[in-house]
Image: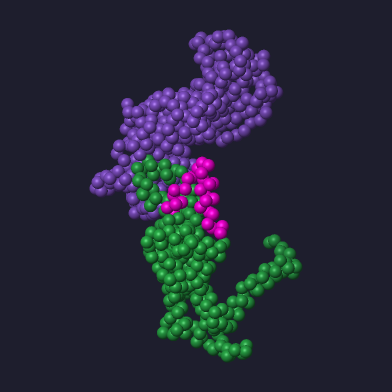
Chain colours: A purple, B green
Amino acid sequence: MARITLDHIAHSYSGNPRSEEDYQLKPLHHIWEQGAAYALLGPSGCGKTTLLNIISGLVIPSEGRLLFDNVDVTRLPTEERNIAQVFQFPVIYDTMTVAENLAFPLKNRRTPTALVKQRVAEIAQMLDLTKDLSRRARGLTADAKQKISLGRGLVRADVSAVLFDEPLTVIDPALKWELRSKLKAVHRALDLLMIYVTHDQTEALTFADKVVVMNDGRAVQIGTPAELFERPEHTFVGYFIGSPGMNLLPAKVAGVRAMVDGHAFDLGATYPDLRGAANVQIGVRPEFVELTSGAGAPVQMLGISDLGRRRLATVDLAGRSLVATVPASFKGLGDQVNVAFDPANTHVYVDERRVQGVAA
Amino acid sequence: MIDKPINNRAWLFVVPVLAFVLFSSIIPVMTVVNYSLQDTMGENNFFWNGDSWFRDLLNPATTIGARFNDALFRTLAFSFVCLLVEVPLGIAIALCVPRRGWSVGISLVIIALPMLIPWNVVGTIWQIFTREDIGLFGAALTGLGLHYNVTQDAVSAWVTIVVIDVWHWTPLVILLSYAGLRAIPDAYYQAARIDGASRWAVFANIELPKLQKVLVIAVLLRFMQTFMIYTEPFVVTGGGPGSATTFLSIDLDKVALGQVDLGNAAAMSLVYYLITLTVCWVFFTIMTQLDRRRDVRCVPESLRDLFSPLTSCC
C-alpha cells in the first residue's frame, strides 16, 4: 500500500538524449494516489509500457526520481519494490499446479508454510480459483491463467501497487467483461493502487477512476473519464477518446465567435483575438453537433450510418467532413441542411492545446 | 467435388524417388536380410540357415553372442556417458552465451566451429594431439606425471574418445538449447524477478520446462550419433587397446570386412538396425506426445500414454 510519485521522470532508450525527440518518455511529474485505479491509455508505441516498466523496475529511467511513499526506489531492483505485474500474455509456471503458482512468490521470500497456505486459500477464494488449486496451471484457459498471474501478485500482503500491461489482449471477448469486473471487485476489496495500461478506451474508461492519455511519449491529459470526454485538453484526446472522435475544424477565433470558412459559430466563452496565431482549431464532439433546418452553416449530407443505439450523419462543411449524431427519428431535412454547434461544448485549440476562454 | 485430373505422367515425378530409395535402401537391406538367413561354404554357394545366426548372436554363451553383448554394452555405456556430459554442459554453456549485442555472432561461430570439421579429420587431429611424444595434449598430461597412453591404456583410450565426442558435438546441444532459450518471452523473466525467484528457481521453473522439446531433439540426435560412433575410435584407437573401445560399429566392421563372416555380420547389423529403429520410435512418440499433451495429466499417466500403442494392440 503506497502512494507512488513520479518526480520528473523521463526515459530515453538510446542513453544520451540530445533533443526532446530522443525521449521515448518525455519528462513527467505525477502522483499516483493510494487506493485509486488509473489507466494509461494511448496508441501502440506511445511510451505507456515504458512508464509501467519504470514503475515496476524493469526499466531504470534516465532522468528523475521514483518515490514509493517517501522512499526513493529509482534504482531499487524489481524484487525489492513490492509491486505486482500482470503481463499481456499470461505468465504461469508450466510445471506447477495452480496452488504452487500462487505460493511461488511467498516461497521465494521464505514465508512460513502455514501462512502461505492461508494466503493462497484467501486469494484463490477471491479470484474463484479454489476448485482449480490442485490442477496443473498449464492446461487452464487464458483467463484463468491471467487470474493466476494476478493472484501471484496479490498473494503478497505487502504489495504496494498492481500493474496491468494490456491484460485482456488474449482473452475471449465474451470473457473480457467478466474478468474486468473481477479486477474492479479486487480493487474495491483490497484498496490497492492499480495502474492499467491499454489502448482500448472502453477498458480504460470503465476500469479507471483517472485516465492518463499518452501520445508520443507524453502524458497529454490526466483526468476522470468525464473530464476527458467533456473537456479534452489536447486535440489528440479529442479524437482518440470517443467513437467517433471529436470534429476539429481550422477556424479564426476572436471574442465569442469562431469563423470557419466564412461561417460564424458561437462559442461558450470569450477568447482573446487569436486571428494572428498559427494553427487555431475549434473542436466539437459529434454529440454536440446538431443538424437543423433553422439557423446554422449550410452543409451537404454525405450519408447516415446506423450504429444500433445511435445514428451518425456525415456532412460536408466547405470541403471538410463533420460527424453529427442524429436522433433515431431523423428522416432528412430536404435540400437545405444547416449545422449548429452547442456553444458550451465547443472548444478552442491553439497548436493542439485547449485554450480556456473567459466565461461570458 | 473437385474433379481431380487423372494423368499417368504424374508417375514420372515419383519414379525417380522410388528408384533412388530402391537402390539406396531397399535392395541393400534386403541383401543383408538374405545373408542373415543363409550360410555359405564359399564359391558363392548359399544354403538356407533359418534363424540360427540370430540365435547365436543373441545367446551370450556363444563366442559371437558374447562379443556382441560386450560391444553393445560398451556402445550403450559410451552413449550414456556422452549424453551425461554433453547435455548438462551444453545447457550450461548456452545459458552463458550472450543474448544480444555484437558478441552474439562471434560466440556462436566459435561454438559452431568443431561441428564443421569432418569426422576423419577430427580423428586424425586427435590422434596426433594425444600422442605422448609429439602431441600437445598427450605430452602435457604425461609431463604432469599422469599415466596417459591411448594405445596401451584402456582408461586413457575411453577418456580420449569421450573427450573427442564432447568437444565435437556439445556445440550441437549448445546451439539447440540457445535457440530454445531465446524463444522464451521476456515477460517470464520479468515475472520471475517480480516474484523474487532465485537464479536457480528461474532455471528450474522456467528455462528447463521450456527447453523440454529441444532437449528431446538434442538427446535423440546425440544418442543416434554416439550409438553409431565409428570414425573416432577407428582412427585414434583402432578399437583398442584389446577391445576396450570396440563399439558396435567397429565390431561389425571387423566381423564383416575383417573376417568376411557374412552370416554373423548380417544378423548383427540387422539387430543393430532394429535397436536404432526402436529408439527412434520411442523418441518420436515422446515428441508427438509432448506436442499433443493437454497437460492436465501428471507424469505417470503420460508415461502410460507413451506405451499405449504397444498395449492397445495386444
**With respect to residue A284, does A128 lie above or below?**
below
Q: What's the residue at 46%, 41% (across, down)?
A: A88
Q: What's the residue at 63%, 25% (across, down)?
A: A322
Q: Report the front residue among B98 and A53.
A: B98
Q: What's the residue at 67%, 16% (across, down)?
A: A261
The image position of residue A284, as x and y in percent, is 56, 22
Residue A308: image quadrant is top right
Residue B256: image quadrant is bottom right
Q: Is residue A252 left or right of residue B89?
A: right
Question: Does residue A160 appear in the picture of this structure?
Answer: yes
The mark total stands at 0
**With respect to residue B118, does A166 lie above or below?**
above
Residue A352: image quadrant is top right
Question: Does residue A141 appear in the picture of this structure?
Answer: no
Q: What's the residue at 53%, 47% (across, down)?
A: B106
Q: Report the front residue among A332 and A16.
A: A16
Q: Which residues are magenta?
A: B91-117
The chief SS type of the magenta part is helix
Indicate the quadrant containing the N terminus of chain A: top left, top right, bottom left or bottom right: top left
The image position of residue B18, as x and y in percent, is 67, 71
The image position of residue A236, as x and y in percent, is 54, 26
Q: Report the front residue among A178 and B16.
A: B16
**With respect to residue A149, does B213 lie above or below?**
below
Check residue B114 for magenta coloring.
yes
Check residue B54 for magenta coloring.
no
The image position of residue B45, as x and y in percent, is 61, 90
